[in-house]
Image (spheres, rainbow, N blue to C red):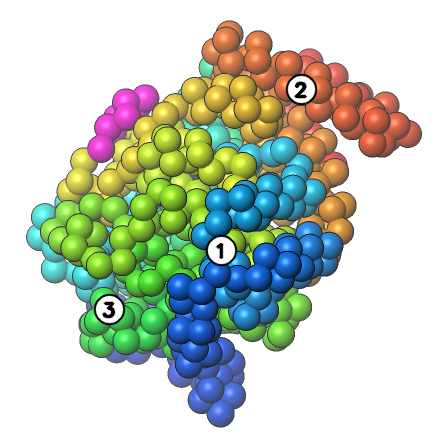
Amino acid sequence: MADCSSIRKFATAADYTKNFIVQGEIDKYLPGGRHFIDEGLINRLIAETDGKAPDPARVREIIAKSETTRETLLPEETAVLMQVTDPDLFEEMRAAADRIKRAVYDNRIVMFAPLYMSNLCVNGCRYCGFREGNAAQKRRVLTMDELKEEVDVLAGRIGHKRLIAVYGEHPTTSTEYIAETIETCYNRQVPAPRTGCKVGIRRVNVNAAPLPVADLKVLRSVGIGTFQVFQETYNRRLYEQMHPAWSVKGNYDWRTTCFHRCLEAGVDDVGLGVLYGLCDWRFELLATVLHARDLERWFNIGPHTLSFPRLEPASGTRVPEESPWLIDDATFARILVIARLSVPYTGMIVTARESPASRNRVLDHGMTQLDCSSNIAIKGYSDFADEAHQEKERQQFMLGDNRSIDEMVRYLASRGMITSFCTAGYRCGRTGGCIMDALKTGREGKFCKINAILTFREWLDDFASPETKAIGEEIIRKELAEVKEWLPKFYPTVLRQYEATCRGERDLFF
């Protein structure tokens, strides 16, 4: 069990709201009160480039820099890419984004599932169904027994190995609760439906409120994967409009310095994201680049992932329908390409908020991770089993893509992509600074290809329909041939592990 003696306890929501923030842990990373999100610079770059066609030669220079160095671009360079409207020049950018993704991550798409633990919240975010005071929301917090039921469906019936566990901000779902849920997920093992092999969750990433350093160290001790916090919007004025000053989330500086505290605490895989549709997408993307660069400046570690959620309808609010900054699918695709070129080494997550058509369209735009068979109602997996059921009063927002994991795996294979359920990098210590270097040089992709083959073989045998298994095995044959070509001396070792997996051994990795 986690040792939670170092963390502060709060008896009431009012006590939590008033006393949770540790000002000294903000000031440390804003020396002289100067914030790393330089709004003056961002606004100047947007004004200078707005409506102006860029020099194609300059655009190609920036593309080449991104491909060859795989280092985060300067905001000035990202601003140039934002100017591109010529379809042919944008296609060059898209093709480069796809090449970078394949050079860094190969042809893998990592699969995960969201698991919502609670919808109690002390905050008043105007766009969110979970916000405090929304009487339409049906509130609950999963017990450990209920959590086990959810894991039984996710791991034992669907076949997921990797979760993003999501928590409302409330003293009921304290760091101690988060740690207990992580441990419960890891400790649950169930038989797979087709083989009877023991299967379970191997990586628990967390989407939760910003935490102090002491709390983050507790989560590190129980094996947290990536710690994900979405900024929602980097525009301070708009942020203050959307998040009331009386709430914990109303403190812009506490939220924006969250990942600095993570890296200080040794939680060295962090996931950035904004809620596209709240503000001008150009402002948000430039701010994301500045955020990544500041983490690199302090710790030489950038974001492990970037996420691209869009505003979606939610209970008790009209903000998602009325915001003046909503983006269409074409703009969403542009954002992904520019993000891939701007932060070349990072993972890029496109969730089931998107429609099937939108996600299908952007598979070759630099993305690396997606979820499917997703249910974001509290206790939704075990209550609704395999149904693509949505209930607005039990969800933070509505989903757009309800495809099953079997359908998605089959579709990805038809596009020449292998679905990866791998979690080996985390358990082998390839995180933080280690993985940053491995990603930039392309070394991590070779490990990941091998581990993707092994975990894909597991999933096909344990869960796949006959149709999906057949097309998946075609992909595996091609992947093994590539490993034999790339790593001929290592190939016999890989083949032995693969054959052991075929015989029913599980969780083998490099």
Instruction: Tell me the residue at 55%/24% (across/down).
Output: 415
Q: Nearer the viewer, residue 105 or 183?
A: 105
Report the magenta residues as a range.
Answer: 383-390
> Is residue 8 a member of the stretch shown in magenta?
no
What is the crowding at mark 1: few (fewer than 14 residues within 10 Å), some, or many (at least 20)?
A: many
Label for residue 452? none
User: In the image, is residue 386 part of the stretch drawn in magenta?
Assistant: yes
- The residue where tag 3 is placed is 243
Q: Earlier in the sequence, mark 3 or mark 1?
A: 1
Q: Amino acid at mark 2?
A: Ile
Which badge, 2 or 1, comes first in the chain's sequence?
Answer: 1
257 horizontally vs 11: left or right: right
User: In this rendering, which labeled residue sits more in front, label 3 or label 1?
Assistant: 1
Mark 3 or mark 2, which has the lower sequence index? 3
Measure how far apart labels 3 and 1 are at the Cα level: 33 Å
Residue 198 position (above or below residue 303): above
Q: Amino acid at mark 3?
A: His
SS at badge 3: loop
- Any part of residue 300 in sight: yes
